[in-house]
Each structure stands twice: as C-alpha cells, then as structure tokens.
Image: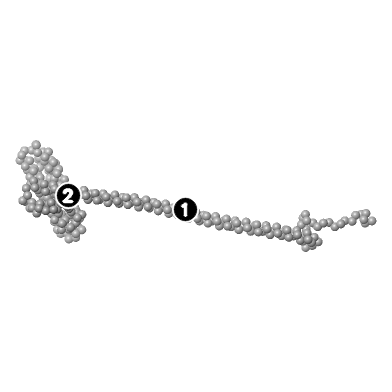
C-alpha cells in the first residue's frame, strides 16, 4: 500500500498525477531528441511546457495539503512529506532547465518562457542540481515557474489582442458586405426604374405620333372642305362638283304667271 494513501488520499492522488506527468516529460524529451524538424521541435516543446505548468500547479497543491496536515502528523511523517516535495521540485526544476536548453538551441522566442530573465539565472543554471540545497532548489524552481507564469500571461494578452483585432475586422467586413448588398439592390432598383421609364417614353412617343397623324388628317379634311367651298362659290355651275348641303347655288329667276300673259 502506498504510504501516502495512509496519510491522505488526496496527497496520494496528487502524487500519482505528478508521477504520470514526470513520465510523460521523460518520454517527451526522449522523443524530442529524435525530431530533426525545428517546427516539430517547437510544437513538442510547447506540449512539454504545458505539462510542466500542470506539474507546477500540482506541486503547489501538494505543498498546500502538506501544510494543512502538518499539525496532525508526527515529525517523521512531516519530514518524509517535505523530502517528497523537495524531490518533486528538484525533478521539475531539472526538466525546466532542460527545456530552456532546447529552447535556446532552437532560438525560438515564442516558446522561450524565460526570456528577459536568463541573466539572473545564469549562475543557477550552471550549478549542478545535486550541489543545491533543498531550499535553493525550491526557490529556484519557484522563480522559474513564476517567470513561466508571467510569460504565459504575456502570451495570453497577445492572443487576446489578436482575437479582438480579428473580431473587429470580421465585424467591419460584415458591415461592408451588407453595405455592398444594399448598393447592389439599389442598383437593381435603379435599373428597373430606368427600364420602366424607357417603356413609358416609347409609349408616349407612339401616342404623340398617333395624335400628330390624326391632327394632320383632320387638317387635310378641313383644307379639302374649304377648297370645295371656295370652288363652288367661284363657279356655281360646275357640275363636276356636287352641291354641298346648305351651299346650293341661288335659284333661277322664276317667271310670274302674269308675266307670261
């Protein structure tokens, strides 16, 4: 039975999770050595970095649980738990240093979570983990993980700004698309109106032409009638022109009966 299970089920569970992460980190770095492509190495380092962040969180939970149980445990148990915690920090610190070494070799600033702080850790990185005391390992690991958190926060801010810019751009494109749709609809309406107006103009032109023809025909009829009247008045004995009703020539002088006698 796991000794930690007898102390606290939660401690045993956290310890199991941390052990799983350490195994994954070990396998990940072994796999990283076999990868030649720099882009794939960068992605692998990012995955390993995420695992180290999760491990850091679990170590903090383990430390918190140990402090909560410290008053109820005997000195031997507390010493064993503190040594266990220091061992976790030491192993995590070794993976962090290994990750920094790979990141420096790749010269990849996107995944270099410790940029801006390498000068302060130059001497610590040169120290062998075996020569450092538990407190030094603990402090060094905490500083490295704090720098990691700060770098993560900066990355999150950059991602958030990028998402905001993308959202604004998408909204602007959507507004422009809607405006273009309205313009197209208006152009269609204008085209329809112009076509309708052209048809009306053609119909009006035909009506005007018809009216002009009728007026010209009436004018010719009136001129003809006037000409006939004038001719009939000038030459009333012309038999080729029929009498117009109401315009008959004057009657011949009638002889009275008494004149005949």
Q: Nearer the viewer, mark 1 or mark 2?
A: 2
Say which label, 1 or 2, has the lower sequence index.
Answer: 2
194 or 39, nearer to the observer: 194
Measured from the top left, where is residue 18 in percent x and y?
13, 47
Using the rendered image of the protein, determine whether residue 115 is visible from the camera's viewpoint. Answer: yes
Question: For residue 83, which numbered disc appears in the image?
Answer: none
Question: Residue 123 at what x, y percent from top left?
Answer: 9, 53
Quadrant occupied by the C terminus: bottom right
Q: Which residue is mark 2?
A: 148
Residue tagged 1: 189
In the picture, the quarter occupied by the N terminus is top left
Image spot of residue 37 (x, y percent): 19, 60
Crowding at dot 2, Cα within 10 Å, few <14 / some 14-19 / many 20+, comes out as: many
- Residue under the image location 43 percent in, 54 percent down: 184
Q: Answer whether residue 87 is visible to the viewer in this image.
A: no
SS for dot 2 = helix
- Residue nearest the observer in this picture, 65 or 149: 149
| Residue plotted at (65% across, 59% down) | 216
Residue 118 position in % (x across, y down): 14, 53
* Count of numbered circles in the view: 2
Instruction: Name which residue lies at 60% across and 58% down.
Output: 209
Give residue 260's quadrant in the image. Answer: bottom right
Residue at the far right in the pictured view: 261
Q: What residue lies at 5% left-to-right and 40% top-to-bottom?
A: 76
Element assignment for label 1 = helix
């Amino acid at each position: 039975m796991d000794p930690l299970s007898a102390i606290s089920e939660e401690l045993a569970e956290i310890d199991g999770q941390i052990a799983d992460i350490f195994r994954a980190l070990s396998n990940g770095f072994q796999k990283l050595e076999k990868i030649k492509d720099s882009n794939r190495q960068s992605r692998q380092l990012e995955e390993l970095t995420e695992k180290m962040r999760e491990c850091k969180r679990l170590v903090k939970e383990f430390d918190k649980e140990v402090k909560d149980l410290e008053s109820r445990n005997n000195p031997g148990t507390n010493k064993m738990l503190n040594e266990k915690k220091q061992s976790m920090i030491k192993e995590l610190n070794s993976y962090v240093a290994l990750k920094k070494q790979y990141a420096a070799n790749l010269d990849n600033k996107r995944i270099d979570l410790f940029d801006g702080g390498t000068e302060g850790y130059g001497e610590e990185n040169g120290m062998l983990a075996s020569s450092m005391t538990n407190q030094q390992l603990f402090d060094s690991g905490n500083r490295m993980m704090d720098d990691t958190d700060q770098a993560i926060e900066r990355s999150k801010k950059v991602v958030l700004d990028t998402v905001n810019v993308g959202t604004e751009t998408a909204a602007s494109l959507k507004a422009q698309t809607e405006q273009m749709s309205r313009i197209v609809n208006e152009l269609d309406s204008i085209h329809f109106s112009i076509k309708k107006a052209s048809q009306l103009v053609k119909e009006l032109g035909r009506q005007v032409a018809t009216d002009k023809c009728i007026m010209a025909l009436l004018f010719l009829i009136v001129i003809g009638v006037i000409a006939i009247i004038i001719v009939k008045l000038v030459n009333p004995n012309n038999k080729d022109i029929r009498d117009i009703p109401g315009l008959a020539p004057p009657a011949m002088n009638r002889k009275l009966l008494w004149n005949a006698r």
